[in-house]
Image: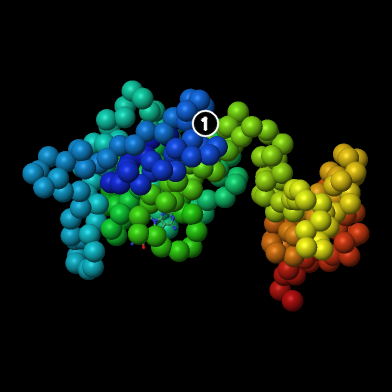
Amino acid sequence: MRIDVLTLFPEAFMPMLRIGVLGRALEEGLLTVSLTNPRDFTHDRRRTVDDTPYGGGAGMVMRCEPLTEAADSLIGVNSLEHVVLLSPRGRVFNQQVARELAGLRDIVLICARYEGVDERVSQQLVTDEISIGDYVLSGGESAALVLIEAISRMLPGVVGSWESVETDSFFHGLLGPPQYTRPPQFKGDNVPQVLLEGNHAAIRRWRRKEALRVTHARRPDLLQQLSEEDLELLAELGAELPTPEKENE
Ligand code: SAH
């Protein structure tokens, strides 16, 4: 997969692109991330990328030309079929969206700054707007990094074992179960016995049950599409399923 990022601050990406799982994926060519600076597509001496808003008001707005020219410069390496603007007004990013984007051959991520981009960039170039949550950042760079990390984990071969992706929170629509490592005893707290015994069926069931427990406690809204086994486990937990809201009562 190829990800092209349009950003005024390409240097902000470098440290994160070098480390850990993502760094290795890039090194092995499982994913390509390329950074393009719209400022390189300005034609005035001061290399201006923003201007004051029509109608007045605070702040500056990113101009159309540097962004669209930067995007045009990608023709031939990127299909420009999926151009995502990072924006607090976009649809909210989650694991499902990460999987959806990971299925694409290429995408462009546009990181805005200031008060955002001229609306005509959205109309003419952008195919999707994504927000990473209901708060306002000063720029799209950290949001783009969030997308890149989450998407990369969904690409085949990036995370060493697919099993570890599958046990991640949200993969099966639940929060992940607790994990333990050595020592078996720490300041009086023991690792649950089932994890020490090597009965894989029992371990799988225990993990599922613990995932249901934590999801029920913290994010009951995620408890949808439950299997027979899930309902059984929840009953064992003595958990009450959230009752669907009754209409017009
Ligand atoms: N005035 C704008 C906010 C501009 S913040 C508004 O109210 O909608 C500057 C830029 O930071 C945005 O254009 C966007 O690219 C990025 N940004 C801010 N918050 C974000 C969020 N929650 N998710 C994704 N990108 C965000």
Image-based side of 15 in relation to 62, left or right: right
Q: Amino acid at mark 1?
A: Ala
Q: Residue at x 14, y 45 (%)?
A: 47
The residue located at (84%, 65%) in the rendering is: 239
Q: How many numbered marks appear?
A: 1
Residue 204 in view of the camera: yes
Q: Nearer the viewer, residue 237 or 25?
A: 25
Q: Residue furthest top?
A: 76
What percent of the width, then of the height, locates residue 24?
A: 52, 32
Examine the rendering and report whether any part of residue 1 can be seen.
Answer: no
| Residue 3 quadrant | top left
| Vertical position of residue 20 compared to residue 238: above or below | above
Q: Mark 1 vs ligand 1: CB under 8 Å? A: no
Give the secondary structure at mark 1.
helix
Q: Picture coordinates of residue 80 (x, y %)?
A: 38, 32
| Residue located 27% across and 32% down the image | 72
Identify residue for label 1: 25
Identify the image quadrant of residue 110: top left
Q: Nearer the viewer, residue 152 or 134?
A: 152
Furthest residue toward left: 45
242 left or right of 197 in image: left
Residue drawn at point x = 20 percent, y = 38 percent: 40
**Is 24 drawn above or below residue 226 in the view shown?**
above
Ligand 1 positioned in quadrant: bottom left
Q: Nearer the viewer, residue 83 or 191?
A: 191
Query: Is residue 156 shown above or below 225?
Result: above
Quarter placement of the C terminus: bottom right
Crowding at mark 1 (Cα within 10 Å: few <14, some 14-19, many 20+): many
Horizontal side of 200 relative to 170 (left or right) equals: right
In the image, residue 48 lies at what x, y percent?
16, 48
Residue 44, placed above or below residue 107: below
Which percent across, then down, holds residue 171?
A: 67, 45
